[in-house]
Each structure stands twice: as C-alpha cells, then as structure tokens.
Amino acid sequence: MTERNILHIRDLDISLGTGDKILNGVDLAIAPGKILGVIGESGAGKSMIGSAIADTLPVGLAISRGSIEFDGLTLTDMTAKTRRDLLGRDIGFIPQEPMTALNPTLTIGQQVGRHLARIGIGSARKREQRAIELFTEVGLNRPGELLKNYTHQLSGGMLQRVLIAMAFASNPRLVIADEPTTALDVTVQLKVIDLIAKMREAHNTSVLFITHDLQLAAEVCDDVAVLYAGQIVERGEARSIINEPRHPYSRCLNLATPNLAGPKTRLMILPKAMPSPLERTAMAGCKFTPRCPIAGDLCIGTPPPLSEISAGHRSACHWPERTETITPPPLKADDENTVLGADLVMKATGLGKAYRQHDWLGRVRRVEALRGLDFEVREREFVGIVGESGSGKSTLTKLIVGLEDITAGVLDVVGMDRATTPRERFFDRVQLVFQDPQSALNPRRRIGSLVTQSLECRGSGLSASARKQLAKDLLAKVMLPPDMIDRFPDQLSGGQKQRVNIARALCSNPRLLIADEIVSGLDVSVQAQILELLRELRKQASFSLLLISHDLAVVRHICDRTLVMYRGEIVEQGPVEDIFTNPQHAYTKKLVAAARGNSGLYADATEQEAENEAF
Amino acid sequence: MRISFRLPDLSLLIGGSVAGLILLCALFAPWLAPYHPNDQELLYILAPPVWSADGSAEHLLGTDSLGRDTLSRLIYGARTAMTVAAAASFGAMILGAFFAHLAGYFGGWVDWIISRTVEVWLSFPPVVLSMLLIIGLGVGTDKVILAIVLVDWTRFCRVLRSEVQVVRGQDYVAFARLIGFSHARVIVKEILPATLPMLITLLSLQMGISVVVEAILSFVGMGVPSDVPAWGQMIADARIDMYDAPWGLALPIFAIFVTVLSFNLFGDGLRRTLDPRHTANRGA
Ligand SMILES: Nc1ncnc2c1ncn2[C@@H]1O[C@H](COP(=O)(O)OP(=O)(O)OP(=O)(O)O)[C@@H](O)[C@H]1O
Ligand code: SF4
Ligand SMILES: [Mg+2]
C-alpha cells in the first residue's frame, strides 16, 4: 500500500455557472492494479467524476476547486494538448452506451484503426495485426471479419467488447468504465465484467468502475466510494461497505435491493428524492437529512466530516454506529399469504408464433419466435418470466395483448380464446405496462389525460370533472400527488413516470396485468418503490401479474411462480424458490449462477455464445 | 406541444419576416401596385429604374418592352407565385402526408406498394415530369398547381414515412391500440401531433420549391396563361432586351431568389426550433 497512487483526486468541486455544486469535496485515490467502484443513484454525480478526468465536462460546468493527479502529474494544471495526448493512451475509457459510442457509418476496422493510429501505431498492417490481437484477447471470434463489419451488424455485447479492446489497446495505466454493463443482458454482463477483471490482471491496469448496481460493485471492486448528492458519504473496502455499511445511505441502498438468497423481507423505501444542486446549496448540514431514518437535530445544522471509523473505512455520518439500527419495514401479516383464486386467467397450449418478413422484392421469409409454449396463470397469481434478450419474452406479451397474431396453438385469456374472440372484449381486462415510460407516455398529453386514456374511445359517460377525479384517484393509488394531473411526462422523474404508466394500466380494473421489464433502468431506491407498490396493489385490487424481468432477484421478490425462456421455448417453470434454489435445466443453472455472480460455470459456454451473438 | 422560444432562431426570424412580407405583397397586390400590371404606356418603353441616370419617379423600377410597370408586375407576380406555391404545397402535403401515414403506420404490403410507387415517381426528373404533365393537362394556373402537386407529393411522402415509422415504434402508439383506439384515431390523435412539426417544416421548404417550378414553367411558356403576370414570364420577356435593359431581367430573378431563400431559411429555422431533441433535453 506504500506504492504511489495512479489516480488521486483531491478535494474536487465541480460547479454550475450559478455556483451550485454538482460535486463537493470529492477525495479519491486508486492504487496500481486496483478497481475502485463509485456507486450512487442517478444524478449523484458519478459520471461527472469520469468527465472531469477526461476533460469532457458539459458546457456550463467547471472544476472550481481541487486537483486531479494522474501518476504524479497534475491533470488540472496541464495544457489541453498534453492532456489530450495522455487520454486514450495512458487513460482508457469504456462508455455507458456501446451503440452511441461508435460511428454507425464507419466500419469497426476503420474506427479501431484510427484509435490505434492515435496511440502511435504507424503502419496500416501493424494496426490490423494489433486489432486482431486485441479482439482475440477480449474473446471476439473471427476478428478479421469483424473489422469489416458496421456497428449495426454486432450485438450490444460484442460492441462493448470492441470498446473494451480499444480501451485496453495501449496498455493504459488507468481505465474509466462508466456503467459498462447497464445496457447489456445479465449473461453478457458477467462476461464483460470477467473481461475487465482479466484485462486488469494481464496489464496491471487500475480501473475506476462507475455503477449503480451494489451487487456488481461488491463482485468486481476492491474498494468502493458511495456518492450521494455530489459528496462521498462512505469509502472503504468493497465487501465491508456492501455487506456491513456504516453510513445510513449505504445501508438504505442495501436494504432496498432485493436478494436472491436469504429470507424475503420488504424493501426499504427512501422517502422523497435526492436534493438537486440548487437545493443542496441551501442545506447547511448533512445532505441526507430529509431522507435519513435516524437523522437528529445535529444533522440539520452541522455537516458530518468524512472521518475514519476503522482502518481504511470512512463514513460521513455523525452516528455511524447507529447504522445497524436501520431495519427494513417488517412484513405485514397479510404480506405472504395471498390467496390465489381458483380460476385460470390465462392458459397457453402449444402456443407458437412465426413472423413473416418481407424483403425488398416482397418475398416472404418465416422466422419462428416462439415454439410450443404450455403454461397457466391463476387468478391473483404473480408469475415471472425470465430469459435473455431475444428469447421471445416480448413476443409472448404481444400475443397475449393481441398486438400480434397467434400462428400456432391455443391461447386462452380471461376465459376467451385470444385468436377467435373480437379484440374489443379484451380491452378492459388485459393491460400492458410498457418497459420504457419515456416511450410509453405520449409526451404531448398531460398526466391527467394519460391515466384516463382508456376511457377516451368508449363512451364512458363520465363528465370532465368525474374524469378528473378518477385521474386523481388513480394517481393516489400509485402514491403520486393529485396536482400532477396537469403536468407533462417530461416534467416527471423516471420513477414517477413509471408510476403513471402503472396507474394508467389500472384505469380499467384489468384482470391480467403484463409488465415488461418495468423496473430495469430505474435506480435501486425507485425500483424498491415500484416493487413495493405492486405488492401493495395486489392486496387491494385483484389482478394477476405477468412480470418480465432479467433480474432474478426482482422476480423472486414479488412473484409466486416463474417461467424460464430460452430461444423461443419455456425450458423450465415452477415456484420461484424451487427454481432459484434448485434449477434443473442447463440454461436456468447458468442464469442463476450468473445472478449469484458465480462465473465458474460460465467459462466454457463463452466461446459458443459469442458465435451465436454474431448476427 | 410546448415549444420554448427562449432562443429565437435567427434564420427563423429573418426567413419568416421576409416570407411574410412577400405574402402580404401577394395578398394586397391591387392596393400596393401603382399600376395595373397589364397597362401599357407606349411612351415609356424600357424605362430604367428610378436610381439610374434618366429614371423617373413615375415608374420606380422602370418598364418593360411593352411599357408595363415593372414594380406592379413584380407585385402581381408575387401574387401568382404565392397562389401557386401555397395551393400546390398544401396539395402536395396533404397527398404526401396521407400516403406517408398509411405506409409508415400499416407497414407490410401497404408500405411496399406505396414505397415502390414513390421510388418510381422519384426516378423522373421533377421538371421534366411536370412539363410532361402540363402538355397533357394544358396551360392554366390550376393546371400548374395540379402538376406541382402530382410531382412533389413524393417528397413529403418519403421523408414523412420514416418519421411516421419512428413514432409508430413508440410504445404509446401500441398502448392506444391496446385500449381500443381505431387505426384512424391512433393516426390522428397520437401520430399526427408528433409528425406535425416535420410536416410544417417540409411545407415551408416546398413553398420555395414550388416558386421555382412555377417560374420555370412560366419561363418556357407552359405555366400560367400569358395575361397573368408571373416572374418566370417577366424573365422570358426581358431576355430579348437583356443588354439595353438588364434591370428587367435582374429584378424578377432577384425576386425569385429572395422568396426561395426566405422560405428555405424559415423552413430550416422551423426544423431546428420544432426539433423535440432541442426541447426534450431540458433538465436532463
Ligand atoms: N449539462 C449540465 N448542466 C447542468 N447540470 C448538469 C448537466 N449535466 C448533468 N448535470 C447535473 O449534474 C448532476 C450529476 O450528473 P451525473 O450525470 O454525473 O449523474 P450520474 O450519477 O452519472 O447519474 P446516472 O446514473 O443517471 O448516469 C445531476 O444533478 C445533473 O442534473
Ligand atoms: S449525519 Fe445525520 S442525517 Fe446524515 S446520514 Fe448521519 S444520521 Fe443521517
Ligand atoms: Mg452517469
């Protein structure tokens, strides 16, 4: 530990033109070959740390105090030119969105070539050689051909590998990875993580790993810093922070994350939201005070220093020792034993779907998306569907709601044959909650009009004021204030939008609700709110839920039963606990292992998987 | 739609005000023009504009070879140009938008047929196609309008179709179908509001294009009838005396140039101002 730090950020402030601080006194250090995780919710300022190092801060933001030292050189004092030379060569970047980081109009080879030329490989032949070498190192098959491909011909996982290869191309001493796996499937996620770990070992590179996923951070990082409202609230060894946090915020995050193992509990719900930079300026004491379960008078006026509580472990709280007294809300008596109805809400027998694709000449090609599905959903039952992207989960939901036609088998929904019954009969009984609230809510409608939209085309006989009241009631159901009815979707936060999305589906009292990845992409604390909301709603309204999720812990948390899908088929189904503790099918085993962070099972499958991903 | 005009776009401002001025000229031509455009004053043939050595204040921009007042003809020409441009652009927009929404929304064979038709249509050079149409239809203001509509609807169709496809892919469109909205209702209530900004922008650009096409057709004598003053015709008439009276040629060309430029600027400004990416980034 006496070695010199590769990266040392000292007392860094980043401010808006108005003087409001985005980052406030951030102190971080990474030793050679170590992985430092930065975790926190959206808007905490995680990406700003990366941007400050890369000198890519958005316009209007600037470093107003402190310094960034890289390998003994002070980045913040350098001329722009020397700094640029350092970036990309001594400091590599793995961006959050692989799709947007590469140029769709150039081949992979051209882009990698450019990068290699920039880091000083002169001849074209040598560049190609090096590119192939790098691609092989990150486990990409047929690297020669890949170089001639365009970005749209590669899957997200493959693109992320290309970017990792580029980041490590110059054997940099520091790599900054900003949520490198958020856009990827669980199974691919793990490979990317493994890869980063492997590259770090091979090149003794230090990594700054930015993520919102606690489990993941515990998995890959040596040390972790928890960021809240632009300040580091806890810093220390990864495992101890994730498992025995000594700051209330870290503890709350931990309690808000559903687990794959251990007893089921209710999730911790943090009230209110993180203060905005403007609000932070007005707060004198601890920025976590309004949301902290154990806040006292001292917290309002006096900011707690980031003080050492044990060797190498720091926490910015007046009473770190009280952290453990924060416990999740107890299970209510009626939480566990929901009585399932006797009737079936849905029954599929030999269900299949083949798509017909037209090409330029109008020729038709058949693609089988689903084959021979058999399953049932009972009244009030919550059923989870898990599987990687492309396994047919979304196609199945489209069949159930009637957005696509069934091409084989029988699907019975709320007691009627989906294929032969007129569409109108299903409108009120089956509802879909879409994955991405951004896309699911028409940005040109007000919230009030959105939540009662289902009444619009059928003469509901409701007066304008009755409709308004209904909108308010629905918002109350999802715990949103009634005055939101006059807002537009882009005036709401992600979690609020998702709640509007759910309220809208509840408008017609459906018997079956289908939720497609409704919590992916949400912050831990927001996800906890939505999950608890669903459990709460289950008690009041009597609907069945089909929850599609890539996150097994989420499925375990709220579902009774789960279906596992793989390449258009259901490979396994049963009660959640059985499936997750004792998986039978090879794919389920792999999935559970991936979710548990056990990559051992995995290594052999990597080769053939990469092959399949290609097109 | 909430559009924030925090930063009024410069080209929107300039293009819009010039285009507006031209439209006003067109609307109030009878009151603005000092003479009737077809009144001949044979004493003042090829009079130069007022600022040249022997120009007179009676004919501010001079006269043409038949002694007609150039200023009045320019103003009435604006009337012709604007009538044709507005009617033709609206017609082309409605036709193009209709098929674009059908193709983009329904996809499949509907899209296939419409897209192939548009491609075939676009393979003819537009000016040639409109001349062929005029030969078939005959001369007349309404015929010119019809010809431009028939030629240029494809431009709307092609651009809007992909826009419609993007919106169609949004989940809120699927949701509207799920709760029982009819196809027509989905298109009008959910899709059209989103494509409207693009529609308006294209309309403005099309105005400029229509002005040019009308001028070309009038220039070759295939446009509006000869008793209707038109810029293209003025250019054609002034050609013969180009060396004695260059102003007669320059002024209508300048009028066309300014009109097209202003509509293009306006369209460009609109595109930028109405672009949702511009307004959506607030608070991100
Ligand atoms: N261009 C900008 N102008 C003003 N404020 C900004 C700008 N970009 C970001 N911010 C603010 O900076 C803060 C930190 O943003 P940052 O992107 O670092 O968050 P993050 O922790 O990376 O979140 P996420 O998990 O969503 O990526 C936020 O409060 C955000 O609103
Ligand atoms: S200082 Fe007070 S408000 Fe802040 S985390 Fe500690 S107990 Fe909570
Ligand atoms: Mg970020």
Image: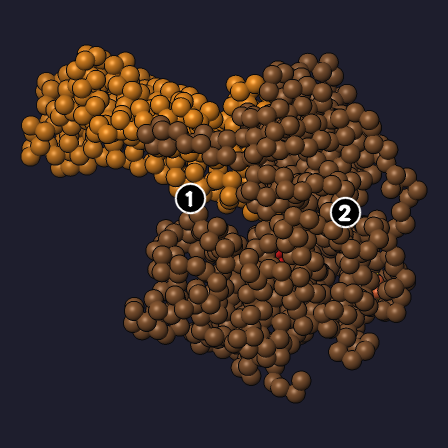
Ligand 1 quarter of the rendering: bottom right
In the image, residue A426 sits, relative to residue A217, either above or below, namely above
Q: What type is the residue that disc 1 sits on?
A: Leu
Mark 1 — residue?
Answer: B10
A293 with respect to B30 (left or right): right
A196 with respect to A265 (left or right): left
Ligand 1 within 8 Å, label 1 CB: no
Residue at the (82%, 76%) spot, across then down:
A309
Helix, strand or loop for disc 2: helix
Residue B19 showing in the rendered view: no
Q: Give percent across and percent down for residue B198.
A: 44, 33
Q: Give percent across and percent down for residue A539.
A: 85, 34
Q: What type is the residue that disc 2 sits on?
A: Asp
Quarter holding the N terminus of chain A is bottom right
Chain coloured brown: which letter? A
Distance from label 2 to label 1 (Cα)?
A: 66 Å
Q: How many marks?
A: 2
Residue at the (77%, 70%) spot, across then down:
A240
